[in-house]
């Protein structure tokens, strides 16, 4: 009786071990260790080596269009003096008219010798009585319009007239000389101010100052840049 029971237990044990070996191993039937739809985890050491990223090349510079390059024009700098202006107001008006981008200006005043008239005269004979005696001789020769100088740079000289036109001065001298008196002509000058405007123009090739300044008698010439 005992042997029969032991034999039944051994058979049952063998059946149980066989069932466990057949049903208890998941990998033997290819079943996944994860739930459906869930990706399998891998260690970093198991990951395949990623290819190195390609080196980034800098973008090529975009060349300028030929049309844009051809429109660049070099500016021609001009330095000139405009004038002379007769009055400070004329100078200020011109400065206002010529003000523009790319234009530098400076004002300056100069003095020039200007002929004011031509003087016809007889040189002083020496003393006052001699000058008066010469004047009486002019009266006797019917030469009028004279004046005996009592002051100035030539006292006792006899003035025969002051003329704006040199031709009229020569005519008067010749008339008195024809009467027997050595008349002379002297140019009378004085220092007068004149006003100038110096310009430095960046785009001088296209800068027309004459169109802007309407003052008559004004010209220009090249000058040193400042």
Image (cartoon, helix red, strand yellow):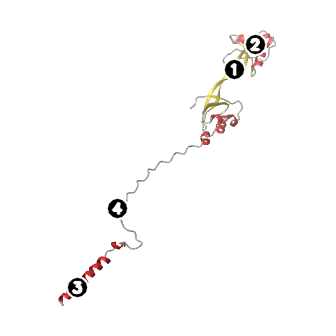
Q: Position of residue 118 (x, y in %)?
A: 72, 19
Badge 2 element: helix
> Distance from label 3 to label 4 (Cα)?
47 Å
Residue matched to label 4? 46
> Distance from label 4 to label 1 (Cα)?
116 Å
> Could you classify mark 4 by the number of other residues whose Cα lies within 10 Å: few (under 14), some (14-19), or many (20 or more)?
few
Q: Which mark is residue 9?
A: 3
> Could you classify mark 3 by the number of other residues whose Cα lies within 10 Å: few (under 14), some (14-19), or many (20 or more)?
few
Residue drawn at 33 percent across, 72 percent down:
28
Can the viewer see residue 107?
A: no
Q: Is residue 226 left or right of residue 57?
A: right
Q: Nearer the viewer, mark 2 or mark 1?
A: 1
For the view shown, which residue lies furthest in the bottom direction?
Answer: 1
> Distance from label 2 to label 1 (Cα)?
23 Å
Task: Using the image, determine if residue 19 lies above or below residue 123.
Answer: below
State the residue in front, 36 or 122: 36
Dot 1 or dot 3, earlier in sequence:
3
Dot 3 or dot 4, earlier in sequence:
3
Dot 2 or dot 1, earlier in sequence:
2
Q: Which mark is residue 24?
A: none
Q: Nearer the viewer, mark 1 or mark 3?
A: 3
Residue drawn at 34 percent across, 62 percent down:
46
Q: Position of residue 132 (x, y in %)?
A: 73, 12
Residue matched to label 1? 188
Q: Nearer the viewer, mark 4 or mark 1?
A: 4
> Distance from label 4 to label 2 (Cα)?
139 Å
Q: Quadrant of the N terminus?
A: bottom left
Q: Nearer the viewer, mark 3 or mark 4?
A: 3
Residue matched to label 2? 135
Q: Quadrant of residue 173?
A: top right
């Amino acid at each position: 009786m005992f042997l029969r029971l032991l034999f039944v237990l051994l058979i049952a044990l063998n059946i149980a071990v066989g069932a466990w070996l057949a049903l208890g191993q998941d990998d033997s039937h290819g079943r996944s260790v994860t739930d459906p739809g869930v990706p399998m985890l891998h260690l970093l050491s198991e990951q395949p080596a990623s290819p190195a990223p390609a080196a980034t090349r800098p973008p090529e510079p975009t060349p300028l269009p030929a049309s844009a390059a051809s429109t660049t024009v070099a500016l021609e700098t001009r330095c000139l003096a405009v004038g002379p202006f007769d009055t400070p107001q004329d100078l200020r008006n011109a400065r206002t008219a010529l003000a523009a981008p790319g234009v530098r200006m400076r004002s300056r005043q100069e003095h020039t010798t200007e002929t004011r008239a031509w003087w016809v005269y007889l040189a002083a004979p020496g003393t006052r009585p001699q000058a008066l005696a010469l004047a009486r001789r002019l009266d006797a020769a019917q030469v009028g319009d004279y004046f005996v100088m009592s002051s100035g740079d030539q006292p006792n000289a006899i003035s025969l007239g002051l003329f704006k036109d040199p031709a009229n001065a020569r005519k008067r001298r010749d008339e008195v000389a024809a009467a027997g008196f050595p008349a002379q002509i002297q140019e009378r000058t004085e220092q007068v101010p004149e006003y100038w405007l110096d310009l430095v123009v960046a785009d001088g090739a296209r800068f027309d100052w004459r169109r802007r300044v309407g003052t008559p008698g004004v010209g220009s010439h090249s000058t040193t840049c400042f």
